[in-house]
Amino acid sequence: MSQVKKIKFERCVDTVKKHLKVKEQVLFSKTRKMEGVDARHTLYKLCSTSSIRNTTISEFMKEKGVSVTEANVSASIRRINRLVDSDKDWANTISNLQKCIE
């Protein structure tokens, strides 16, 4: 894996933690509480917009102790895309987060 991709991934992690006010242990847990789910899905979306492939996201998550398949990452990104399309608050949140990682 590319060191550049790893740096981008960590930048996305830091952005999600800071702006969604979620702790790292929640972000990298398998909790089904909305706080953790939304944070993880947002992380996947930010990574994908940073040109990190779903396979690579899956590998980085595994390094953090979370086993997630490429298909799960894809489904999560689709969920966030639907939220962005239907909810102006989500659209603004994702847009603001993307600006933070550029």
Image: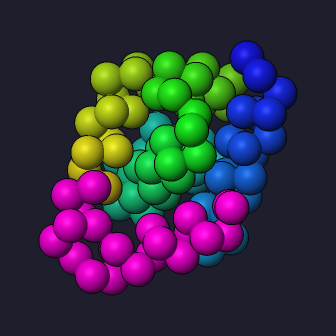
Location of residue 42 in the rendering, given as x and y in whole percent from the top left corner: 46, 55
54 sits to left or right of 61: left
Which residue shows up at 69% across the image and 23% down it? Answer: 63
Main structural element of the magenta stretch: helix, strand or loop?
Answer: helix
Say how the picture is coloured. rainbow
Q: Is residue 80 magenta?
A: no
Q: Is residue 10 left or right of residue 52?
A: right
Residue located at (27% from left, 36% from top): 75
Q: Position of residue 74 (x, y in %)?
A: 33, 33
Q: Observer-nearest residue: 50 or 97?
A: 50
Q: Quadrant of residue 84?
A: bottom left
Residue 7: image quadrant is top right
Q: Nearest the camera: 27 or 11? A: 11
**Screen quadrant of the N terminus:** top right
Position of the C terminus, as image quadrant, is bottom right
Q: Which residues are magenta?
A: 81-102
Is 97 magenta? The answer is yes
Total number of numbered discs in the rendering:
0
Q: Nearer the viewer, residue 57 or 33?
A: 57
Left or right side of 53 for 89: left
- Asked whether the viewer can see residue 3, the reply is yes
* In this rendering, position of residue 31 left or right of residue 64: left
Residue 73 x, y percent position in the rendering: 39, 33
Name the spot of residue 43 as percent of width and height, x first: 53, 50
* Residue drawn at the location 72% of the way across and 58% of the way down: 14
Tell me if I can see residue 33 in this picture: no
Judge whether 10 appears above or below 38 on screen. Answer: above
When the figure is inspected, residue 85 is found, relative to residue 69, above or below; the finding is below
